[in-house]
């Protein structure tokens, strides 16, 4: 009886692995297609019969891609890097302080500020892109790095996540520091922040990925001076006489940094989700 | 009783005149701590005001004017912008597009994420590897995904992967993204978003599953609940708060749909009349053309924002109601 049971269990586990492997193949397929298209020549890509392993490889594409001055992929990568790093550090800094304050202000002011944050959480920035764009244009920030960063760096999502985490932070630690004469600023940086690196890593990773991959905001703000990599790829994709290998090599170059960041930091994301307010 | 008098004594000690402390003293908190906290929150709140609240207010104002390429309009038109939009068949069909999109993407993503989470929780060997595989598309942008889907997977020409496979099994080429009488573009849109975000929600659900105490499962097993019964009567009820959060995030995400649509369907300065979710339509009518129509765009923003708030309130109400029912 128990033998039969365990055989059936083993069969179920085997079935699970079969399903997992099939799904994994599907999930990895787009990555494979990007690599295949980047390193094949054009005739392979437009051949009537789909070639899983291209008959003709072509590795000169990266060289051509970076040499193409009109496309300006290096400049776009540079812009994206500057914007993402700036936006990530500023968002985390601003949201950390605000999230801590919202978790400790337990009077009517705290309530009002928290509702302002919650409303923005429900109505995300993308929905109000037009008013924000009009404001940014008023400041004369079109086609500038600050125009790409500052209007979108006040993240209600990040602030809310920090607030939820700090609500569970043991106050005894802060009180001990206060008795030692530390003011809230010192207490925050010496006691609270060092004990919250997990959630900081999680919010930082999410913000970096979101910023690197952003499309709508740069589409509104970027012109010739500050195109980001997503804008360049999008325009390249719809341009006349598109060259497939260059295009997909561009996509490959665009996803490598963010996939690397992601692979190294995904444990923060997983831990962050477990400790934060999303329950 | 004695505790009460102790409090009174404490209060009178802090304010020598014997009055209750002034509002200002109470607001600033012990050692002025609340002032520090207010200063901490200030940059964020100022940012929200300048880049969210004031612009929304301004847009509301603009929406009652004819504001073409100006933000200081002079011609008051009342509700004309609103009536124009609400009677515009393309705007109305964009709201329908959003409804269809949300009706598919929200439940399908939830079910797939839950399925993946349960599948992963049941295996030990290779769990971290498979989790990474499903999670990694989260790092890819909608632009790059749209590129793969539009130019390789669902290319309407014969060299697209989907068309190659169809022909191999005796089918014919499909024009996936052309629209018209052909609704296959929904398959393209849904599968793309599913690939990109299912891993993220899977992680949220795994975290929720890990919070269910092991004893609950043991108790259920003793009562003979296994397989589907366990899922229905133990796992799903225990996962309720996670489910609510995930569904809310998915709905908000569906409202924001923009990137993949513009990159799947857009050409050089052109966009078809179908497959236009509200944000895409707003972008095209207010900024996409040669002339910026900010009054119309403002009205559209107010309508879409109102819709989100309505949906959000409806969902909160539903959740609260079912929670009350459960308690009874």
Image (cartoon, helix red, strand yellow):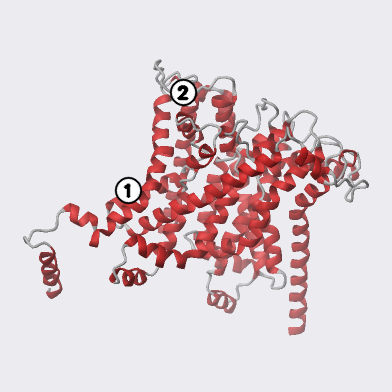
Q: Secondary structure at mark 1?
A: helix
Above or below A190: residue A107: above
Name the residue nearer the viewer: B123 or A243: A243
Q: Residue at x 67, y 25 (%)?
A: B270
Using residue A231 as the reference point, say whether residue A189 is left or right of it: left
Specify the quadrant of the image occupied by residue A68: top right
Q: Tell me where residue B284 appears, x and y as whole percent.
A: 59, 27
- Name the disc covering residue B295, or none: 2
Label pair 2/1, CB-CB below 8 angstroms: no
Q: Where is mark 1, residue-wise?
A: A112
Above or below B293: residue B232: below
Using residue B7 as the reference point, say whether residue A273 is left or right of it: right
Q: Chain of mark 2?
A: B
Q: Secondary structure at mark 2?
A: helix
- Report the Cα–Cα distance between label 2 and label 1: 30 Å
10 Å neighbourhood of mark 2: few (<14), some, or many (≥20)? Answer: many
Q: Residue at x 41, y 22 (%)?
A: B64
Q: Tell me where residue B37 appears, x and y as whole percent.
A: 32, 55
Q: Chain of mark 1?
A: A
Using residue A58 as the reference point, say whether residue A110 is left or right of it: left
Residue B278 shows in the view:
no
Labels 2 and 1 within one chain: no
């Amino acid at each position: 009886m128990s033998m039969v049971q365990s055989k059936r269990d083993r069969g179920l586990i085997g079935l699970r692995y079969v399903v997992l492997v099939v799904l994994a193949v599907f999930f990895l397929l787009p990555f494979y297609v990007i690599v295949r298209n980047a390193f094949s020549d054009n005739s392979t890509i437009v051949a009537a019969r789909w070639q899983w392993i291209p008959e003709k490889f072509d590795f000169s594409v990266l060289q051509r891609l970076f040499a193409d001055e009109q496309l300006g992929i290096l400049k776009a990568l540079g812009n994206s890097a500057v914007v993402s790093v700036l936006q990530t550090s500023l968002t985390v800094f601003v949201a950390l302080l605000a999230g801590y304050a919202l978790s400790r202000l337990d009077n009517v002011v705290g309530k009002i500020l928290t509702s302002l944050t919650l409303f923005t959480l429900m109505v995300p920035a993308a929905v109000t892109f037009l008013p924000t764009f009009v404001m940014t244009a008023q400041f004369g920030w079109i086609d500038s790095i600050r125009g790409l960063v500052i209007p979108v760096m006040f993240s209600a999502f990040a602030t809310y996540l920090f607030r939820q985490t700090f609500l569970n932070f043991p106050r005894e630690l802060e009180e001990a520091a206060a008795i030692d004469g530390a003011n809230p600023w010192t207490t925050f940086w010496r006691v609270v922040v060092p004990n919250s690196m997990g959630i900081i890593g999680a919010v930082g990773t999410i913000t970096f990925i979101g910023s690197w991959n952003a499309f709508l905001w740069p589409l509104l703000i970027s012109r010739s001076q500050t195109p980001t990599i997503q804008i360049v790829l999008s325009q390249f994709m719809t341009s006349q006489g598109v060259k497939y290998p260059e295009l997909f090599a561009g996509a490959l170059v665009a996803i490598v940094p963010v996939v690397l960041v992601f692979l190294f930091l995904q444990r923060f994301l997983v831990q962050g989700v477990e400790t934060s307010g999303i329950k | 009783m004695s505790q009460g008098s102790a409090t009174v004594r404490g209060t009178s000690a802090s304010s020598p005149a014997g009055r209750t402390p002034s509002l200002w003293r109470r607001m600033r908190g012990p050692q002025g701590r609340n002032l520090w906290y207010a200063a901490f929150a200030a940059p964020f709140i100022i940012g929200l005001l300048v880049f969210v609240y004031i612009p929304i207010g301004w847009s509301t104002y603009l929406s009652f004017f004819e504001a073409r390429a100006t933000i200081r309009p002079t011609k008051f038109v009342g509700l004309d912008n609103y009536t124009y939009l609400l009677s515009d068949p393309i705007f109305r069909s964009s709201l329908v597009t959003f409804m269809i999109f949300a009706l598919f993407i929200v439940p399908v993503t939830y079910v797939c994420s839950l399925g993946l989470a349960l599948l992963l929780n049941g295996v030990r060997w290779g769990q971290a590897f498979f989790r990474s595989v499903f999670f990694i598309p989260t790092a890819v942008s909608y632009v790059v995904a749209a590129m793969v889907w539009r130019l390789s997977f669902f290319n309407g020409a014969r060299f697209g992967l989907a068309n190659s496979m169809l022909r191999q099994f005796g089918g014919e080429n499909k024009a996936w993204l052309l629209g018209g009488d052909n609704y296959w573009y929904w398959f393209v849109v849904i599968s793309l978003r599913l690939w990109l975000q299912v891993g993220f929600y899977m992680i949220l659900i795994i975290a929720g599953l890990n919070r269910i105490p092991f004893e609950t499962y043991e108790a259920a097993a003793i009562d003979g609940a296994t397989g589907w019964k366990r899922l229905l009567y133990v796992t799903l009820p225990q996962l309720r708060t996670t489910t609510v959060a995930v569904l809310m995030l998915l709905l908000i995400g569906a409202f924001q749909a923009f990137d993949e649509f513009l990159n799947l369907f857009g050409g050089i300065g052109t966009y078809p009349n179908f497959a236009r979710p509200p944000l895409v339509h707003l972008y095209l009518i207010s900024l996409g053309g040669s002339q910026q129509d900010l009054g119309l765009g403002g009205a559209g923003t107010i309508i879409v924002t109102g819709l989100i708030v309505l949906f959000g309130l409806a969902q909160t109400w539903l959740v609260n109601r079912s929670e009350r029912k459960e308690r009874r």
